[in-house]
């Protein structure tokens, strides 16, 4: 019994930890023990809109990312805090060096886990089942399952202006042989592009010209395990600054020297993090573009310039950066660069992240077409769980769209595919009021416990929290606030109607102008409860109507969603189906009607045909 | 799939009748009963031959090679001489040659299954089949051409604008994008609501186009209601006598006024009667007024105004009505205010009356025919979309977080998707196929 994980980035780490913790001996291969473990080669930040939700979900299932972030962050903010709780998103600035060391040590000290520096050059398959991996030193490791989590290292090349270098991020070599081996196995491959801004020396920046961005106080930890911990503090201040007309002129004047515009780069880049060239060209009427100056580690002077990525030649980059207020004399430590890499077409995967045509072979992370550390970690966790379960002869687990962002992410990838690096967004989920970051534990911890990744202690903490929430909701629903002069004055001051007869506490909380916290002085019997319990109580009561509607939608959709498509359907012979749909369905072989309905090229009429076909087969 | 066949024109003694076949093998079956060689997309003249070699009819046969046909399959169409005997004979010959009788709506169902049309198109086709007049057919045809889809898609894109306005700040929180507030969102939602309202309120008109516009004729006994009805229908239908109160039952008829289907009811004369039989007739007439979209109050211009006339004018003021003064061919002594003057006897003033009825049916504003809803399911979806939008409006106006109220905007979008068939549920499919009728 043995699992191999290729790559020790965010996907590979979660995959290897999950598999090893589930009791399966697991070897984790990395190109560099020093540079490539839990590296944050782009933004030294974890969380943000929707990504923060993923981190909480990973934690709820027993993953490592949130704990590592809590241990190594240097600034923490809850994004959208001033807005509705459904879209609160935690985001932390990470000490890049500390994060790497933390994860490396966790890997080194986990039972069943063997961390090795080696390049995997070949994957062996026999009778449609993976049998092992071969290293660049011609060592063969026999395995029952292999998880590919190669990130941006397959056939990668970095691009600065017209200088193309065959290399992965941070000077670590690219892995070319493995990409060729995968092609030979018949795995459909694609090529993507992404980019990153320059790092500059803190001492060369004039901070007096920059706006400050400070962290939260108090801080909400990412891991549910640390919910009751206090003493977290921000260690750095980030800064905001802007491009100006001069910057834009420099960019426009040199567009012909950008490999993106000259057509030298063929890979598809992500729309949501465009290079500064793209921003200036596409939003020509915008007078300035905001960007952020963020420290990458406590014991380093390197500063990450978020929002200023580019693949211009280095001399143009310097002119661009120097045109910005506060950066006039900045010194580059690493230039901005673009990177191209090979990846698999994720539609070749099942929702378990196993390849459809090779038993025991799994894909995770950027290799599957995503972007971002959090998206990678989420998939790594799922691939690790399923690989371990397969080796142990247990049933595979599919995460549902209605239950998690993890499920939404994977379903999108494997049924729709992607033509750019896929980033998680809240608007991708049709159930986003149910899938909040605060209730990730309620949604997933029981499952994590059942799988065996959630410790008994964590599970008990979760049960206790739920009990507190349930009791407080019940109390709030049965509490009536008597009328009083003070209450009336308070209600009027909040801009809502006063009450002469008194009101149910829950009815008051439901009013948009009022909050659970604000009503505390009138709620005499209120117990002292942790902040996260109060938050859940407020959300549950305030949005009760909306939440109930979403839940009934989930139930309704589950009829279509869970209608299983038999494995033996020959789609090519269903005469009612359009030709494109026949081909797509035959290629994808969806497991459920719900999944079929989301495949691009399968239209509603085709789903009707399938429904009719299933009826006639009965 | 088996070759299906059906008589595709109405089973009446019309001049021409159509027998249609569809499915793999339609060509072989059609050829086996036809004397001339078939040609793709060409009408060929020949004899239809029965199984004993007898000539059933001389006819045109047009063959369509799939997928370039209505159903997407091989199809053959026999244009025969009308008459039930002939058509049934041809159908029997086709069935003898190996075709099977088509189920209700099966041609359109096959067209749908072969991806030849989307749901709004196939529903519009059903409407073409059941259209009661030429104007309705045009409406249904415009929908089949995707005009409904265009309007819905425009509304959809309006809603997507609102939705994206809200979701962008949820998704790009770190970039400091300002959340849109009620002052920005409410007018946007209101505009979408107006558009939805316009579309859904066209259902009344659209429904009239499809099912007929109900009009009842009321008036005292013997003012000429039956004569007017006969004039509108163009033949004797009601009993016209000189004795007051001849028409005790409501007689209704569907007629076509310049392309508009009208369900016209002739009611018993209304007046304060002591006669119990007639009293029942009057009660039924009043009920008929309630059930109609328009009541035509007919007065006798040749007799002086009496108490009954005054009571009727009051009644006319309480419903959607036209006041018509009849018998202008005689000596006129009583013309009510705003009355349309006619003579049912010699046809004077009928054009004015007909255009007044049409105006009432279609609404006074000229109508964009494409933006009319004729299908109850569409109306229901638009109603739900409207409700969702108004919930979103109220919530945002009251200060609920836009990203929560957004759920209702999303709901409205899903409802619109139901019209063009973008979302599919088992129940919906069942219902559509129930409503299909055989060989259009």
Image (spheres, coloured by chain):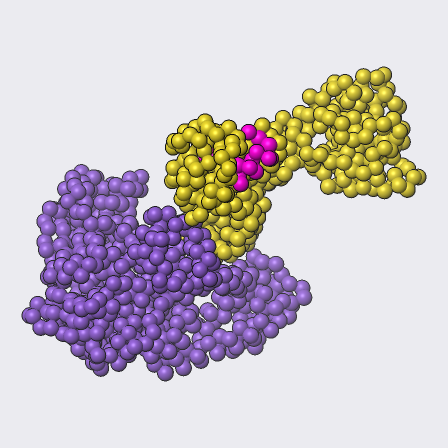
Chain colours: A purple, B yellow
User: Is residue B295 in view?
Assistant: yes
Q: Nearer the viewer, residue B389 or B357?
A: B357
Q: Nearer the viewer, residue A530 or A387?
A: A387
User: Is residue A223 in view?
Assistant: no
Q: Quadrant of residue A465?
A: bottom left
In the displayed structure, would residue A53 be above or below residue B419?
A: below
Residue at image position (7%, 70%) is A138
Q: Is residue A589 magenta?
A: no
Residue lying at the far right in this picture: please name it: B274
Taking the image as shown, residue A452 lies to the left or right of residue B102, namely left
Instruction: Pinpoint residue B250: horizontal percent, then vertical percent.
Output: 78, 38
Taking the image as shown, residue A383 lies to the left or right of residue A534, namely left
Q: Where is the N terminus of chain A found, in terms of image quarters?
A: bottom left
Instruction: Pinpoint residue A275: horizontal percent, then vertical percent.
Output: 23, 49
In the displayed structure, would residue B98 be above or below residue A357?
A: above
Residue at image position (66%, 35%) is B213
Residue at image position (58%, 71%) is A477
Instruction: Pinpoint residue A180: horizontal percent, then vertical percent.
Output: 13, 59
Instruction: Pinpoint residue A17: horizontal percent, then vertical percent.
Output: 25, 75
Residue lying at the far left in this picture: please name it: A137
Count of marks, rendered view: 0
Residue at image position (38%, 74%) is A447
> Range of the magenta residues?
B76-92
Q: Nearer the viewer, residue A506 or B420?
A: B420
Taking the image as shown, residue B420 lies to the left or right of residue B222, namely left
In the displayed structure, would residue B198 be above or below residue A536?
A: above
Residue lying at the far front in this picture: please name it: B52
């Amino acid at each position: 019994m043995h699992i191999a994980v290729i790559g020790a980035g965010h996907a590979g780490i979660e995959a290897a930890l999950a598999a090893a913790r589930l009791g399966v001996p697991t070897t984790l291969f990395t190109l560099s023990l020093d540079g490539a473990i839990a590296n944050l080669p782009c933004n030294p930040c974890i969380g943000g809109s929707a990504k923060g939700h993923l981190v909480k979900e990973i934690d709820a299932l027993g993953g490592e990312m949130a704990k590592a972030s809590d241990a190594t962050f240097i600034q923490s903010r809850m994004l959208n805090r001033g807005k509705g709780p459904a879209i609160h998103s935690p985001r932390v600035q990470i000490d890049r060096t500390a994060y790497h060391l933390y994860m490396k040590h966790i890997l080194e000290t986990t039972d069943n886990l063997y961390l090795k520096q080696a390049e995997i050059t070949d994957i062996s398959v026999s009778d449609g089942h993976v049998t092992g991996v071969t290293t660049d030193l011609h060592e063969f490791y026999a395995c029952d399952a292999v998880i590919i989590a190669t990130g941006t290292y397959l056939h990668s090349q970095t691009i600065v202006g017209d200088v193309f270098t065959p290399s992965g991020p941070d000077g670590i070599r690219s892995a070319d042989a493995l990409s060729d081996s995968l092609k030979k196995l018949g795995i459909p491959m694609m090529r993507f592009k992404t980019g990153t801004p320059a790092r500059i020396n803190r001492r060369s920046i004039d901070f007096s010209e920059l706006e400050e961005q400070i962290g939260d106080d108090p801080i909400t930890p990412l891991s549910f395990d640390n919910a009751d911990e206090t003493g977290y503090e921000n260690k750095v201040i980030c800064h905001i600054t802007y491009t100006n007309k001069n910057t834009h002129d420099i960019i426009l004047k040199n567009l012909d020297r950008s490999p993106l515009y000259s057509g030298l780069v063929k890979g598809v880049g992500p729309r949501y993090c465009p290079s500064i060239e793209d921003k200036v060209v596409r939003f020509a009427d915008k007078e300035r573009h905001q960007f952020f100056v963020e420290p990458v580690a406590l014991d380093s002077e390197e500063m990450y310039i978020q929002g200023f990525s580019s693949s211009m030649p280095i001399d143009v980059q310097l002119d661009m950066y120097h045109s910005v207020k506060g950066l006039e004399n900045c010194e580059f430590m690493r230039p901005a660069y673009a990177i191209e890499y090979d990846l698999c077409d994720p539609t070749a995967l099942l929702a378990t992240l196993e390849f459809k045509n090779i038993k025991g072979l799994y894909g995770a992370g950027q290799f599957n077409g995503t972007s971002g550390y959090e998206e990678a970690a989420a998939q790594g966790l799922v691939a690790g769980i399923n690989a371990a379960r397969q080796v142990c002869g247990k049933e595979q687990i599919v995460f549902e769209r209605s239950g998690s962002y993890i499920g939404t992410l994977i379903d999108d990838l494997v049924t729709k595919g992607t033509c750019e690096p896929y980033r998680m967004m809240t608007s991708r989920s049709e159930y986003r009021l149910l899938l909040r970051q605060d209730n990730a534990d309620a949604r997933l911890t029981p499952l994590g416990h059942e799988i065996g990744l959630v410790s008994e202690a964590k599970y008990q903490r979760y049960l206790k929290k739920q009990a507190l929430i349930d009791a407080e909701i019940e109390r709030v629903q049965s509490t009536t606030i008597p009328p009083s002069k003070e209450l009336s004055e308070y209600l009027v001051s909040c801009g809502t109607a006063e009450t002469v007869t008194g009101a149910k506490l829950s009815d008051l909380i439901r009013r948009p102008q009022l909050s659970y916290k604000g009503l505390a002085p009138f709620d005499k019997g209120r117990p002292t409860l942790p902040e996260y319990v109060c938050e859940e109580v407020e959300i549950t009561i305030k949005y009760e109507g909306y939440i109930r509607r979403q839940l009934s939608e989930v139930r309704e959709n589950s009829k279509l969603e869970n209608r299983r498509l038999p494995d033996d359907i020959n789609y090519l012979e269903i005469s009612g189906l359009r030709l494109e749909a026949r081909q797509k369905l035959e290629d994808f072989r969806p497991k459920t009607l719900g999944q079929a309905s989301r495949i691009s090229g399968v239209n509603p009429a085709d789903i009707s045909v399938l429904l009719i076909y299933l009826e006639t087969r009965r | 799939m088996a070759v299906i066949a059906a008589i595709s024109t109405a089973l009446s003694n019309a001049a021409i009748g159509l027998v249609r076949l569809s499915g793999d093998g339609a060509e072989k079956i059609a050829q086996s009963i036809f004397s001339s060689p078939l040609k793709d997309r060409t009408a060929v003249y020949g004899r239809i031959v029965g199984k004993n070699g007898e000539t059933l009819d001389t006819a045109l046969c047009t063959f369509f090679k799939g997928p370039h046909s209505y159903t997407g399959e091989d199809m053959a169409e026999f244009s025969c001489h009308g008459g039930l005997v002939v058509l049934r004979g041809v159908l029997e010959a086709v069935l003898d040659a190996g075709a099977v009788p088509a189920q209700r709506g099966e041609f359109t169902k096959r067209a749908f299954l072969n991806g030849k049309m989307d749901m709004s198109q196939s529903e519009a086709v059903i409407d073409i089949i059941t259209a009661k007049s030429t104007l309705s057919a045009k409406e249904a045809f415009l929908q089949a051409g995707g005009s409904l889809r265009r309007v819905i898609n425009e509304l959809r894109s309006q809603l997507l604008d609102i939705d994206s306005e809200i979701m962008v700040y949820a998704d790009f929180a770190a970039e400091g994008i300002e959340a849109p507030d009620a002052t920005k969102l409410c007018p946007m939602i209101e505009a979408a609501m107006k558009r939805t309202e316009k579309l859904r309120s066209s259902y009344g008109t659209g429904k009239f186009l499809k099912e007929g516009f109900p009009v009842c004729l009321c008036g005292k006994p013997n003012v000429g209601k039956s004569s007017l009805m006969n004039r509108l229908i163009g033949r004797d239908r009601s009993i016209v006598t000189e004795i007051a109160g001849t028409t005790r039952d409501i007689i209704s008829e569907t007629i076509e006024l310049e392309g508009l289907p009208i369900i016209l009811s002739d009611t018993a004369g209304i007046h304060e009667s002591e006669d119990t039989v007639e009293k029942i007739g009057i009660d039924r007439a009043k009920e008929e007024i309630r059930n109609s979209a328009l009541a035509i109050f007919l007065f006798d211009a040749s007799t002086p105004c009496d108490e009954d006339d005054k009571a009727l004018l009051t009644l006319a003021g309480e419903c959607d009505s036209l006041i018509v003064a009849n018998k202008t061919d005689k000596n006129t002594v009583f013309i009510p205010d705003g009355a349309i003057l006619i003579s049912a006897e010699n046809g004077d003033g009928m054009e004015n009356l007909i255009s007044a009825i049409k105006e009432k049916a279609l609404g006074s504003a000229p109508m964009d025919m494409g933006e009319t809803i004729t299908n109850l399911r569409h109306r229901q979806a638009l109603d739900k979309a409207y409700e969702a939008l108004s919930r979103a409006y109220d919530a945002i106006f009251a200060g609920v977080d836009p990203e929560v109220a957004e759920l209702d905007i999303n709901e409205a979008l899903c409802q619109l998707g139901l019209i063009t068939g973008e979302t599919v549920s088992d129940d919906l499919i069942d219902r559509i196929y129930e409503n299909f009728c055989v060989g259009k």
